[in-house]
Image (cartoon, rainbow, N blue to C red):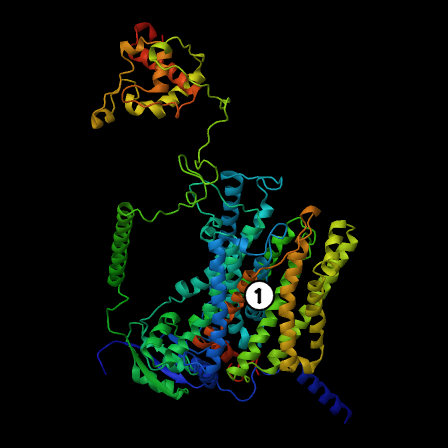
Amino acid sequence: MKSGSTLTTAESTLQLLKPPSVVTGHLTIGGLDDQVLTPVGTKPPLAWFVAFSVTLSATLIGIALIAYTIATGIGVWGNNVPVAWAFDIINFVFWVGIGHAGTLISAILLLFRARWRNAISRFSEAMTIFAVICATLFPLIHVGRPWLAFWLAPYPNQRAIWPNFRSPLLWDVFAVNTYFLVSLLFWYIGLIPDLASLRDRTTNRVKKAVYTVLALGWRGASLHWHHYERAYLIIAGLATGLVLSVHSVVSFDFAVSLVPGWHMTIFPPYFVTGAIFAGFAMVVMAMVVVRKTMRLENLITDYHLEVMNKVILTCSCLMGYAYLLEGFTAWYSMNPYIHHTFMQYITGSYWWAGWLTITCNVLIPQLLWLRPIRRSYSGMILVAVAVTVGMWFERFVIIVSSLHQDFLPSSWQIYKPTFVDYGILLGSFGLFFTLVLLFARVLPVIATSEMKMVLPGSQPAHKGGRHE
Amino acid sequence: MSDRKIFSVVGIFDSAQHLMNAIPDIRKRVNAPLEAYTPYPVEGLDKLLGYRKSPVGGMVLVMGIIGALSALGFELWTSGRDYPQVTAGKPLFSWEAFVPIMFEVTVLFAAFTAGLGMLLLLNRLPMFRHPMLRSSSLPLVTRDRFALAVEARGAEIDVEKITRLLQEFGAKSVEVVEEPAPAGVASPKFFLRTLTAIGIVCILAGFITYWTMKLFPIVKPMVHMLDQPRLNPQSPSRYFSDGSGMRMPVSGTVARGSVPYTIRNQELAGDLVNPLYRTETVLRQGRQAYMNNCSVCHGVLGDGKTSLTKAYGAKPANLVSQSIAGLPDGKLYHVIVAGKNAMASYSAELGEDERWATVHYLRVLQRAANARDEDIPK
């Protein structure tokens, strides 16, 4: 009797440890295709058009104001010495950061064999690409004459000069471009089997022609899968190093300079954590909407959302640690300039931005310790919005609060953004969500071939292998 | 049945388990290559079919190392040698600063080798003419079925026997896939024709662009430095009250390096004395000035015979003739400053020193043209 009860306890403990199924309800492999691939390329519902018109309007406002900026010059922005970097660089860092969650989900979690990633990887990878597009926009328009941006490329020219390879700004160009290209490649390679499924499903001739070309004649041969899996794993490994390097390089733009508040060794890990933090918040927001409107509750389950919320909670604690360490560095270094800058963060002209950052990034996400909040829509949306706002203001604090009082008190200035700054920020959000909405209608939002791989009963139950 | 060649016999299975159960048995009984088609990667299938380890890893390693070395080498060469810049007092070959870009380029090379190498080299994609793509089995495979193909690969296979075998080991249906009709878009001829067409279009586009730009110079490419707010010589300006863009010198002053020249007559200029010594530097300066300004008309040798003479019917003076060789330095100087006959003044092109140096160089030319025996070095 006694031994029996021990066994039951052990079994129930094992049951608890076993990760829950990645899908709810009964789903066959073919049923997955029907659910995910059928809506692709069909006429969207009214709600989609409403959302699309809103995001497209925002995009057009952004485009008009960018045109105004380029035609007139970047003097139409609020930037001025000593705050020479403001909204443009804040938005750049913000959007690059948003992208990082996608690569983390698609690459790092693949290496960790976290099977729950398969349902959300496609969507978050797409978000990575769109976020990086939004991000690259800002340095491009910040250079003032974007048609000369090719000067950043090291090409032999009649001026007989080369770009400065010791400059973090050039590292940035290489890092962000590499990140974009590798993310695009990773995303496309993941899409190929799904495009083949779409090709074989559709009866529309035009669509079939498009999908045929895009699928490159994929036929699911086992030898192809053999090479494909290997290559996919290797790119995931490379992307893991890349995702850690990209935001580190972005942080070097600050850390390699001598500005107090920027010149700190904690910046690379601090930036990478912040990037993943903000990115996951964006993914959670998008996923809640996607699973609801596209009826994917059985594929993107409460378990998925809960795991993502746990990642957000972890990152939030790390961010809190980073903020504390900034204060500690200011105190322990006994450097009056760093001390002054840190006090500016929390008591200076922009004290409200500093405290907003701490509240949104550290305090509000602590709600996620409670399981009901991790599983409630309103709870997680509240946290995700707070984190998005908080992370934007964190970059505001780092850039504007540090710069507006530089070494020369006579040049101290209060930075005020103009309507153009706000409009272009709005435009970047518009562009991002426009691309997301388009993506959700023309390509499968869930990587079906990856999902099929982890569905119950999809793998042969051979000896010693993994099985359900 | 048509008389086309048979490519493979394909059996469709309901699950990965059924497929994997059937493979060892069929392999024992059929002496033909097997290929499986699955909607997703099936664990253990590659071992069962006896594939060797994929070479992607090795390719990535090699290309990654090439990427790292080429990035580092390029950075060292550009920043340290071809265009040396000292940044923050660091040495020219400061490799530490080159690591981030080296890393990014390594990842770029490696990732694209993995992705494109897998697609293009190993899997031979894009491939739109594979017989499987025309079969009715493939739509089942890309959805949820598993196919095992016994491939002919040019040899004869016993279709009936294989069909029976596949059904015996669990295939729900069997399809015979034929080779596609020969020729078509992917033939070498087609590629050759496409390449030729692209080449012709490129050449035509180049010619059209060249002539359009030449005949209709509306589009000025890359004129950013011309399009700037600046004042051109002789142009008006609203900035100054007299409306003229150019300014007179402040009265009673002389610009540095320019002494006012007041002699109006070549005869009176004969008394001027060349202030420069005949040093090698001065002669080099004179030659430079002569080559740049005078040689077009008067000729490299100073004899006044150039291609321009014929083309324009002009008769520039023969500077090495006896009459000109006999003139004093001052009179030659005067012609440079004031011009003579069709020759315009060169006072704007040449500074005072350059004019006198040119006169010295003229003497060299004259002596060279009328050399005596004792001028020849021993």
Q: Is residue B122 left or right of residue B209?
A: right
Q: Amino acid at mark 1?
A: His
At 24% from the left and 21% from the top, the residue drawn is B305
| Above or below: residue B28 compared with residue B241 | below
Residue assigned mark 1: A100
Q: Is residue A253 left or right of residue B364?
A: right
Q: Position of residue A176 (x, y in %)?
A: 53, 58
Instruction: Check the residue under mark 1 and report the chain it is in.
Output: A
Mark 1 element type: helix
Q: Residue furthest top?
A: B374
Q: Tell me the quarter of the image containing the N terminus of chain B.
A: bottom left
Badge 1 density bin: few <14, some 14–19, many ≥20, Cα 10 Å: many
Image coordinates for residue A84, horizontal then vertical, percent = 60, 52
Q: How many marks do you count on the picture?
A: 1
Q: Which is more toward the observer, A459 or A200?
A: A200
- Provide residue B203's location: percent of width, then percent of height: 26, 51
* Direction front: furthest residue: B241
Q: Looking at the picture, does residue B58 appear above or below residue B279?
A: below
Q: Nearer the viewer, residue B109 or A443?
A: A443
Rendering coords of residue B56 (x, y %)? 47, 63
Question: Up-down: is A258 above or below B354?
Answer: below
| Res A378 → quadrant | bottom right
B368 or A300: nearer the eye? B368
Which quadrant holds the C terminus of chain B? top left
